[in-house]
Image (spheres, coloured by chain):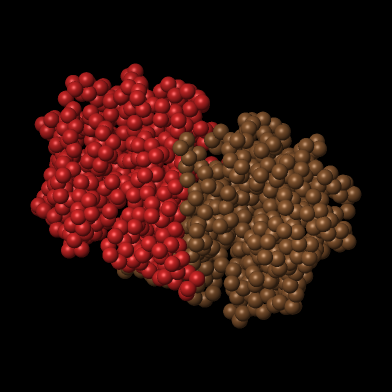
Chain colours: A red, B brown
Amino acid sequence: MSDIEIARRAIKKPMKEVASRLGIPEDALEPYGRDKAKLDGDYVKSLGNHKQGHLILVTAINPTKAGEGKTTTTIGLGDALARIGKKTAIALREPSLGPCFGQKGGATGGGQAQIVPMADINLHFTGDFHAITTAHNLLAAMLDNHIYWGNALGIDARRVFWPRVLDMNDRALRDTVVSLGGVANGFPRQARFDITTASEVMAILCLANDLEDLEQRLARIVVAETREGKPVTAGDLKAAGAMAAVLKDAAKPNLVQTLENNPVLIHGGPFANIAHGCNSVIATRAALALGDYVVTEAGFGADLGAEKFLDIKCRQAGLKPELAVVVATVRALKLHGGADEKALEKEDVGAVERGLPNLLRHVENLRKFGLPVLVGINRFLTDTPAELELIETKCAEAGAKAYLCEHWAKGGAGAEALARAAVGTIDEGKAAFRPLYADELPLAEKIETIATEIYRASGVSIAGPAKRRLKALEAAGYGKLPVCIAKTQYSFAADPELRGAPTGHVLPIREVRLSAGAGFVVAMAGEIMSMPGLPRVPAAERIRLTENGEVDGIF
Amino acid sequence: MSDIEIARRAIKKPMKEVASRLGIPEDALEPYGRDKAKLDGDYVKSLGNHKQGHLILVTAINPTKAGEGKTTTTIGLGDALARIGKKTAIALREPSLGPCFGQKGGATGGGQAQIVPMADINLHFTGDFHAITTAHNLLAAMLDNHIYWGNALGIDARRVFWPRVLDMNDRALRDTVVSLGGVANGFPRQARFDITTASEVMAILCLANDLEDLEQRLARIVVAETREGKPVTAGDLKAAGAMAAVLKDAAKPNLVQTLENNPVLIHGGPFANIAHGCNSVIATRAALALGDYVVTEAGFGADLGAEKFLDIKCRQAGLKPELAVVVATVRALKLHGGADEKALEKEDVGAVERGLPNLLRHVENLRKFGLPVLVGINRFLTDTPAELELIETKCAEAGAKAYLCEHWAKGGAGAEALARAAVGTIDEGKAAFRPLYADELPLAEKIETIATEIYRASGVSIAGPAKRRLKALEAAGYGKLPVCIAKTQYSFAADPELRGAPTGHVLPIREVRLSAGAGFVVAMAGEIMSMPGLPRVPAAERIRLTENGEVDGIF
């Protein structure tokens, strides 16, 4: 059965029952359809002072075409913790429509470790991303409108930084000219569209403490500069109030359930390659107040997702994760080891061995943040005992016990060993989380620290304009912000072809973008784009409604 | 008190109680938050063969800056019908975010004749418009993606008709160049963005009978032509299935309530100037199956909204309206009569008399469709007895009784006289609805018929390329479609400055666009634009969250 078929056959519990597993009262639920709900804003606020659960981060090796199953493992581990009697909250990110229509497909787990309603969550869900798109584009429209009606703030049209966004893979919008057609349409200028997940509004929603903080962050967004280089903000354009109003409901965490009816808070954005790629602080804090154990995930490989989770989200929000789980598969390690894509089902211990350094380096990296690390091997039917044993041995040598996980086939029951190990490791109390670098480090050195310590590059090459921009940002008082490196997810390096654990590469930074409201500086590495394209055969071609009106073709 | 303050103090009934007034069972409701719901798709389908209520169309004189209150009157009349004991369903259109952030403000009625939750309905509501935006832009992305990956269908990039859309007033996007930046971004071409309400997908959603018809219509959308002039459709691009899946929930009517807790089905799109501007056929049919009386509205003046409601929607769906109510205000008639905007509060019987021909012409026009007509005078506090009496006298002479309506101040109680007259007129059974023109009339003659019979133009001037396009559309088999004229709402003519009841004007048609899926041909008259702009001081500058997280500043 395909994932969507399994999901359709799920026996869902009423939302009030799902909520009650975390002690959430029914009147704190705002229903969205019959099997989705938002948590009431006042209720979420009221959770602030409650007890704190243990925070577990699930991350992964660099992704390959074989698929790793990070979200699947996050769900499986959460279900497993519930099975062994722990009050558990799973805190996930919401899927983007771009990859759903494109290559990657949905993002709600797989096999017996899924969240439901699968199609709804992958399509519009409760409208959060559409609200972000709207708030973002409202600011863009107000900016061009301000210039149109006399430009009292003196915006330099050449120095407009604020793009427009769509939750769509649409390469035609990467580089455009707007306001053509004469006087009535404004002043022509070059402009870009990003995918919504890359919007600073998404990052702000995910990093804000509450609605007040959200509005203040929105007001701080720097959208442009004057000819004199003075920043112009969303606050200057009087846009922050309406943007916050537009985001009022999007700021509330969403509740859904796993196939095993365990509660999942799913809130905020993916895309750890071009964004910071974590679920929201509001949802993570609510989960920590409600659950004794909270399993969350960060996007793509640990070089991107986990680094940003730890250096940006946990730093800003004061979160103290106690364990990292790195997900790997035999098949993906083979690809990192240079195996042929078509030969992944054949035993190839050599390829696994050559690919293992990718996994082991992520393990090493995570320990630099003061975190104990476990490895979860997301089992495929074609994995052989020799391949699995090799991984377990090498991980043990590196100080990280590896656990075979069969949640894809068996649900939570398949990840109980990992769950018990997680509880045991946390009980040891050895976690001592610390970010990788200090706030005070100059921006260029922060980039260099991540590049050398995490990506293991031999150095960084920052293009002239980017170098000058970093200096200017420091002069303007943004030097203490963390950096968010936009980089391909497929490699430790900026070159997606460099699998495994490359060394000797140089990290090329071509452009720097300020996210003053989100509170970080984005450094664009290599050819990474903030608007993806669709593949030759988009997944959308297969998506359709069945005769009884159900969605089919999301995978 | 402002409208939003009145709305916030509304004592709302639980949705199941609101639904029960129309006999809708609780299990047919899909809740969206606590005070919005969608009607279950299967339930809506099951209504198909039930009894049919009486359909009343509320329309208006040409709008002015003074405001007429068409939606307000629709709500007031519905509440009044309920007060006099009639089982009544109100069927409205959903507001667009563009005017909400721009000049016009919200679109949920006013005073004591409003629907709630006011801010929610005006912002994202249940996400229908965002779903339409997404489905529309998915098709655009798949089109450019098809060209990018080899263009197997042979699309002529100069003949791409399909724009992108946003639910935003953003003049900068009216005329753009996309796909700049080199090989990876596609082939540069000129392209436009429309506002979502003008999307053919919106029209399709509003005109479709059900999900199957929706998908078939989507597949028929003509997005481009080949070099040989062969049409390329959404079906050819394999996009219709995913678009229908994206619209699955948007196709379900939404249920909200008036301040008097009467049920309102609100579904589908506004903007009768650049679109056909009617609520959905699905919702109207459901309302007719559920209520003995159904009050619906069509956008702007009767020259646009009512004509399209009757010639496009009722023609396609086989609906038989039995009564038209034309809404007017003393203040607006004064403006049509040439009064000064700042002197509307002073008695000026002469200005009312000079403005009355606008109202009387709409009355005359509606009778050409075989409909009995009543006039509803939406009372303002500054209206004087002499002004009101003049309107009543002149309307009576024209064969349409006028009723003073005070629903703004008094709710349904203020519109009881109109409600009793509506019931009485329908009981007389004199309605004999017929569209204005026959399907068989050539397209250019259809345009001419509307121009001369409704707009009272002396003729039509069709630009050369538009004329050739009309011929080509007839040759391609689209000649039997009705036409949807895009024209300013402020005048019978294409010139917004021509108030009152102008004659001798010529209707200039500059461009023709095919909506093969919606089933009509759009003729662009004068300078009307399918993407509005924001005013000098956008309403968005005033929208904000209050300290307790409620939206303020929507008016």
Residue nearest the viewer, comparing B105 with B78: B105
Residue A136 % position (x, y): 41, 52
Image position of B3 (left or right of A311): right
Where is B310 relative to B249, above or below?
below
Residue at the spot x=47%, y=74% of the render?
A182
Quadrant of the rendered structure where residue B350 is? bottom right
> In which quadrant of the rendered image does the N terminus of chain A lie?
top left
Residue at the spot x=72%, y=52% of the render?
B382
Residue B152 % position (x, y): 43, 67
Name the residue at the front extreme. Answer: B346
Where is A281 relative to A104, above or below?
above
Image position of A471 (left or right of A145): left
Residue nearest the viewer, comparing A467 with A505: A467
Residue A303 % position (x, y): 21, 44
Image position of B428 (left or right of A347): right
Residue A445 % position (x, y): 13, 50
Residue at the spot x=78%, y=37% of the render?
B83
Residue nearest the viewer, comparing A288 with A354: A288
Image position of B390 (left or right of B231): right
Where is B118 relative to B316, above or below?
above
Name the residue at the top extreme. Answer: A85
Could you tell me if residue A76 is visible in this image? no
